[in-house]
Amino acid sequence: MEVTKAVIPAAGFGTRFLPVTKAQPKEMMPVLDKPTIQYVVEEAVEAGIDDILIITGRGKQAIERHFDKSYELEEELEADGKLDRLDRVQEIADLADIHYVRQKEREGLGDAVLYARKHVGDEPFALLLGDTIIENDRGCTETLIKQAEEYESSVLSLERVPCEQVPSYGVADVDGSASADGSFPVTDFVEKPPQEEAPSNLAITGRYVLTPQIFELLAETEKGVGGELQLTDAIRQLDHVRGVELAGDRYDIGNIPSWLQANIEMAIRHDDGEMNEAVEALLKEQFV
Ligand code: G1P
């Protein structure tokens, strides 16, 4: 089994971030100098994938414009001798072969993924949620792909979250111990369970490698929690699913505290020394 394609759903409303997201997609929220979805595309590219399908919807045109060539801007930067900025702008359009399909109605994450069926075909694929940045030393998607290829199985990235937060996530029911590489079989999943019914506090983090069986299952799955077609309800019917707990920092950009945290922590870790110092000085001034 070889994973050569990635799918990035970016069709949801950004209601928790209104009014910022009234006229711009939440996936375009900047973290430092890049929109969130660029980090997600870069994670897929770093995992060796150059065929990416982004699921968009109404009001999401800014995403296509961002990954397109920008002739006027490039000419202006060249004429002004701003060559380092020109490089950065050109790199975006050359990142990968990016395709788009529009979800017609917002019927849930499972419905959005079903729109990838024609493009992906009968192949396994990586799935990365477009509003979540994951930073760790070895790319999350790269690790999942290695394990999926080794076990010939779907693999999901999981993270232990505080118990009171489990109702916001898909949650795994795990049986058996982890193999040497840290992955383990998952027997069941439940989407957004009440805290007292959750089988664990191992939450789905927004990075998956799925076998194409998921499309058949999604097509037959009924709407679930919130009246939406839930991806998790189809994943729980897959023949084999493994989970892996990955270290690293995960930022769900759809809410303000997490978006602020992403900006601050990523500024401090950034290799631009001037920026690190400026942000650290600002924090000291405010909190020390
Ligand atoms: C989605 C998935 C959920 C997952 C979460 C991660 O939920 O349905 O299983 O745990 O992403 O962020 P959403 O956040 O879109 O409600």
Image (spheres, rainbow, N blue to C red):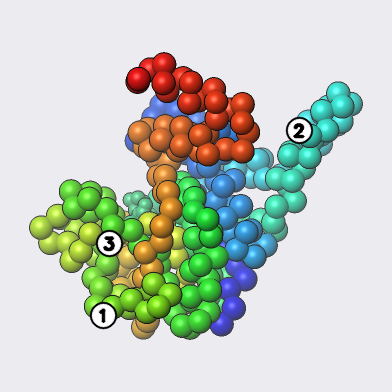
The answer to whether residue 111 is above or below residue 261 is below
Q: Which mark is residue 85?
A: 2
* Rendering coords of residue 74 (x, y %): 81, 34
* Rendering coords of residue 66 (x, y %): 65, 40
- Name the residue at 79% across, 34% down: 84
Q: Which residue is mark 3?
A: 202
* Badge nearest the viewer, 3 or 1: 1
What amino acid does circle 3 point to? Leu
Task: Tell me the SS state at disc 2.
Answer: helix
* Rendering coords of residue 218 (x, y %): 39, 70
> What is the quadrant of the C terminus in the image?
top left
Mark 1 or mark 2: whose residue is earlier in sequence: 2
Alpha carbon separation for disc pair 3 and 2: 41 Å
What amino acid does circle 2 point to? Arg
Residue lying furthest front in this view?
288
Mark 3 or mark 1: whose residue is earlier in sequence: 1
Q: Which residue is mark 1?
A: 176
Alpha carbon separation for disc pair 3 and 1: 14 Å
Q: Residue 48, can we see it?
A: yes
